[in-house]
C-alpha cells in the first residue's frame, strides 16, 4: 500500500471517529429533549414523572447502535473506494 493510500485510509478513520461522536451526541441530545418533554407532559397531566435513567439509557443505547452502524458504512465505503481505485490499471 502506497503512502498516499495509507494517509487516506487513516483520514477515513479520523472521519469515522468524528462522525460517530456527532451521531452519538445527536441521539443523547434527543434523549434529553425527550425527557424534558415527558416531564412537562407529566406535570401537565398530573401523572408520575418519567424516569430519567430509563430515557437516557435508551437514548445512549440507540446512539451507540446507530452511530456505529453509520460510521461502519462510511468508513468501509471509503476503504472500498480506496481499494477499488488501487485496482484500476493506469496507462503511462
Image (tube, rainbow, N blue to C red):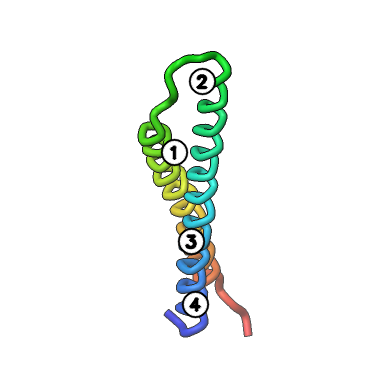
**Mark 2 sits on what residue?**
42
Above or below: residue 64 compared with residue 2: above
Image quarter of the C terminus:
bottom right
* Residue in the foreground of this view, choosing between 15 and 27: 27
Please state which of the two labelled residues, at mark 2 or mark 1, is closer to the viewer: 2
- Return the x and y of residue 15 as percentages of the image width and height: 52, 65
Q: Quadrant of the N terminus?
A: bottom left
Q: Residues within 10 Å of mark 3 (few under 14, many from 20)?
A: many
Q: Secondary structure at mark 1?
A: helix
* Residue depicted at 41% across the width and 38% down the height: 56
Residue 12 vertical placement versus 76 (above, below): below
Residue closest to the eye, 17 or 26: 26
Q: Residue at x 49, y 79 (%)?
A: 7
Residue shown at 51% from the left, 62% from the top: 18
The answer to which of marks 2 and 3 sits earlier in the sequence is 3
Determine crowd level at label 2: few under 14, some 14-19, many 20+ residues with C-alpha closer than 10 A.
some
Question: What is the distance, in whole Å, between disc 4 and disc 1 at their CAs?
Answer: 37 Å
> Which residue was labeled with disc 1?
59
Q: Secondary structure at mark 3?
A: helix
Residue at the spot of label 3: 16
Amino acid at each position: 500500500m502506497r503512502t498516499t493510500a495509507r494517509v487516506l485510509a487513516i483520514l477515513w478513520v479520523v472521519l469515522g471517529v468524528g462522525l460517530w461522536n456527532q451521531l452519538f451526541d445527536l441521539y443523547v441530545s434527543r434523549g434529553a429533549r425527550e425527557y424534558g418533554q415527558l416531564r412537562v407532559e407529566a406535570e401537565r397531566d398530573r401523572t408520575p414523572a418519567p424516569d430519567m435513567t430509563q430515557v437516557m439509557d435508551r437514548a445512549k443505547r440507540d446512539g451507540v447502535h446507530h452511530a456505529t452502524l453509520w460510521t461502519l458504512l462510511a468508513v468501509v465505503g471509503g476503504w472500498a473506494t480506496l481499494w477499488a481505485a488501487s485496482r484500476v490499471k493506469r496507462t503511462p
